[in-house]
Image (cartoon, rainbow, N blue to C red):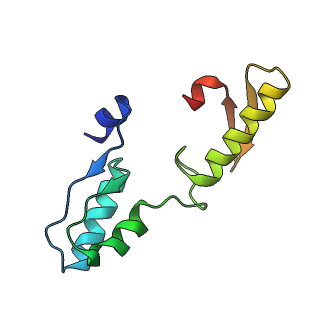
Amino acid sequence: MATIAQAFGVQPIDMVCIEYRNQAYLEDECAEGAELGFQAKQAIHPAQLEAIHKAFSPSDAGMSQLTDVALARAILEAYEAGTKSAKGAVGLHHGGRDIMIDAYVLF
């Protein structure tokens, strides 16, 4: 479901956890949803918000996905530098990875 949503340009949002008082269950469900590619989760009770925010907030530490804040910033900076120098594509070395950046990476 998450992959299909992303293919159509829709943010994949995981369904609500009805176990609103069981924090351990909610944390497990959030982790599973994030692993499946969901980018957010619905909540039915304010007590769920902390676990949901923790599971679905971008991190500077992880570099495995383009949604990570540090990598996204580096990609934008590399692309902007490339367009200013009239390059169609630029290379980016970030987090031990070599990535080619061009307009298709951004859109």
Left or right for 104, reference 23: right
* Residue 18 sits above or below residue 68 on the image: below
Residue at left 34%, top 67%? Answer: 52
The residue positioned farthest toward the right in the image shown: 85
* Residue 14 sits above or below residue 30 on the image: above
* Observer-nearest of 96 and 37: 37
Q: Residue 9 location, x and y as percent?
A: 38, 32
Left or right for 55, reference 1: right
Position of the C terminus, as image quadrant, is top right
Q: Quadrant of residue 20?
A: bottom left
Q: Residue 50 location, x and y as percent?
A: 37, 74
Residue at left 27%, top 75%? Answer: 46
Q: Say if residue 97 shows up in the picture.
A: no
Position of the N terminus, as image quadrant, is top left
* Observer-nearest of 49 and 61: 49
Residue at left 30%, top 55%? Answer: 33
Q: Residue 41 location, x and y as percent?
A: 30, 58
Q: Residue 36 location, x and y as percent?
A: 32, 49
The residue positioned farthest toward the left in the image shown: 18
* Observer-nearest of 27 and 43: 43
Q: Say if residue 17 shows up in the picture.
A: yes
Left or right for 48, reference 101: left
